[in-house]
Amino acid sequence: MTQTAFKNRLGITLVMTHFAIILYTLGCYFAHGFHFDELTTSISLMAPLFASYTTVIIRDMLQETIVVNDRPANSALVFITFFLVSAFGIYLFVLVSVKAFNLGFGEFDQFKILLAISETVFGVYIGQIISSTYKGGEGVQPAPQNQEDPSKLASPSLGSP
Amino acid sequence: MRNITIAGILVASSFTYSSLLFSQTDTSHVVVERITQLVLGDSDTVRVNRREFEAQLDLIQTWTRTNRESFEYSSDSTGGYPYERTAILERLFADSSSYTIRRSELQNLVQRYRSWQTLVAARSDFYDQIVVKTVGQLEFEQPEVERDLKCYAQAFHAVFVASAIVDTLAIWKVGEALKINEWSRDMRRVRRGSVSNLLEQLRRAIHGLGRTATVACAPSAYIQRVSILADSALSRFSHDYVNNSTDPYLLLSDSVKQGFKEVITSLGARSQDIEETTEKINALLHRVSLYPKGLTTRHRILSLIFSIEPSVIYNDEWLGSRGSLLREWLQSADLNRAVELDTILPRSNGGFDVALVVQSPNQKVDGRQLLAYIREQVSERLFWKTVNLLGTAPDRLRIHLWADCASLSLYYAQGDIQQGGFACMSGYAEANIDFIDRSLLQRAVTQPSRISVVSNQPDFSQLLYAAVIEQLRIRGVSVERQVQRIKVDNNQVIFRIENLRSEVIRNESYWENIQFILRIRRSPSGSITLACITDGQFGTGIVVGPLNRPPAYHDYRNMEPRFSRQLQSYTSEFLQRIRDTLRSR
């Protein structure tokens, strides 16, 4: 997997995971797994981390960049990154399920505290990955202003002198 | 059993120490200042002779005795008191008859002298009331323990004897039921005595420390707070009398010093055990209370020791949540937010004293008018609502409303009136006027949510409960698992249904708990009037296949006022079904 592919897949995975968790929490609310105030509290704990990741990822994707010398990504980094993201997603899913199905928490405050701690702890880990991957990492360079289009070099237009 | 007994002893000793040491702080600075003023006047130093100073020491003792409220102090029974007195006199005067003393030095001496007296008195009280009488019932299996006990008692009674008892109990095997019962009775007596003597002092100490003023007599909260205070007191004790004291009679040897430190460490560690044990007991008793038939002899003894009624939950957090619900209800009731909950004080018999403060919304309405309005409009609803929320028997609840200098007490006066039921007592200032408010009963009978059934059955309450059970079975309720019978007597049937789904709030899938109070009133003509009062809670939780666990107890919310209409509708339907069932019989 190249670095560009790794970055794209990581971004999509992060956004989709967090979005899915928020949708799942909403679903649990509609199935009477949460009171309304519990729903808003839960989402307000999840949303800031989600918003910060999404902002960085989308901003990076919107930048017009040309990748030169797209080297293969470090396999260990790929593994640990996807492992962390997957583990975080599964963890949040289990946490919300445990509360919604009354499987483990004595009261909502316990769930809230655990969710806040989890978001903080995982936020540190994933924040490191996000900042290193989406902030001017190697192999990702802005397109040079004065460089000609490589396709033009390969197939010059007819009629040119 | 053994752990619980140890905990009881430690708590009893903690009562004595903590309250006495804290009670000293209430008035000590006053006494110190007055003694200093008497001896020194306005100057910083003065030359005192020995005889005059001895007279001042006697004065300190007199004041100490006066300021101690619930404590009999006798210098004759406290062997340590003359030692400290001699030590002070020898240190100051040695062989001379006079000494020039500074203000700070005198204040320090007086302070230490008072502390010593308090401590010695505490030791005497503890030794006389607890140790001698309870140790006598034990059979020592190892003679060295008894020897150590005597040795420790001579050296430093209170702490070391407590330690010796702990050691003794560690080897004491649980004997016959008779011994256990005797022990339990003694522990209860000691505990009751400690509570009644020291509760007020403890309240002041806690108030002085800025803690919450609602000191519950409930064992859980009480023991937890006392253990905190005991830790604090023992820390002070250790610092003042082990590290700083040079009294040769106190620190007999290095081994005693070391032993004392070990006891302090041990007590500190055990205070955590007390909390954990108490939590376990409360949890156990709560669980047992749901299944009264499962109450074993061991559980009964445990409940006797701590004077806990198995059907009552003593838990600070639980009490707080109940108080919040009552506050919510008071705000939702039509009272213009004039009534505020002040305190809920558990009583030793499992009942509660609830204090409410009525605040006048403007200057034109005085307290008596407000209380009269409350008595007429909401007193009955308020009373039964509180009964429901606290889960106590009606005859164990007293509600006191205060407004300016007027007061109103609500209580259940069974037998005071023919119909049995609700009664009011009102008062103004100190001139109480007792009366039974029959108009409330009259109006209650005519309200639409009540039905009349003509019956000649002598045991109508049992018949009624059987009809209820039959109805619940028809509705698919598992009576064995979900229905908790609280009280069935001639005048009322109280029961609780737990873990229902969509029974009251039908268009939503919530978990529900409902408590019913069916009040039976008999008229001279033979007709019986039923009044049904329900209180419901709901909680969230998704049910899919085998995943059908109800929420935890604390996670339920009151149905009112959000689902008041559904609750009222359900109550009416329930009464109708009960009436039909009774008629069919």
Image (cartoon, coloured by chain):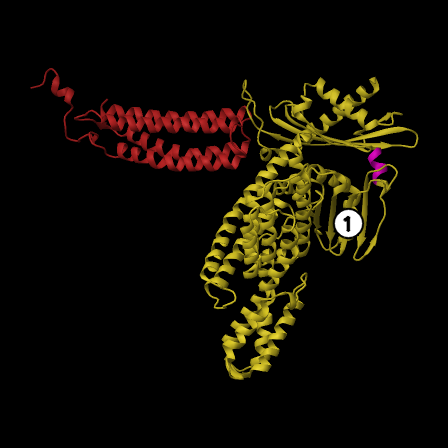
Chain colours: A red, B yellow
Q: Is residue B102 above or below residue B215?
A: below
Q: Which image quarter is the N terminus of chain B in? A: top right
Residue B91 placement (x, y as % from top left) = 50, 76
The residue sitting at the front extreme is: B143
Q: Is residue B61 magenta?
A: no
To which chain does the residue with label 1 belong?
B
Question: Does the magenta stretch mainly form a helix, a strand or a loop?
Answer: helix
Inspect this view and state whether residue B572 appears.
Answer: yes
Q: In this view of the protein, which residue sits in the foreground, B316 or B364? A: B316
Which of the 4 quarters of the picture holds residue B17? Answer: bottom right
**Which kind of residue does numbered mark 1 sit on?**
Leu
The residue sitting at the top extreme is: A158
* Residue range (magenta): B440-445
Q: Is residue B295 left or right of residue A61?
A: right
Q: In this view of the protein, which residue sits in the foreground, B551 or B274? A: B274
Residue B571 placement (x, y as % from top left) = 73, 27
Residue B457 placement (x, y as % from top left) = 87, 25
Q: Is residue B141 above or below residue A76?
A: below
Q: Is residue B308 above or below residue A146?
A: below
The residue sitting at the left extreme is: A161
Residue B393 placement (x, y as % from top left) = 74, 38
- Mark 1 lies on residue: B408
Which of the 4 quarters of the picture holds residue B282? Answer: top right
The residue lying at 40 percent from left, 35 percent from top is: A119
Q: Which image quarter is the C terminus of chain B in? A: top right
Q: Is residue B422 left or right of residue B330?
A: right
| Callout 1: SS | strand
Inspect this view and state whether residue B342 appears.
Answer: no
Which of the 4 quarters of the picture holds residue A148? Answer: top left
Q: How many marks?
A: 1
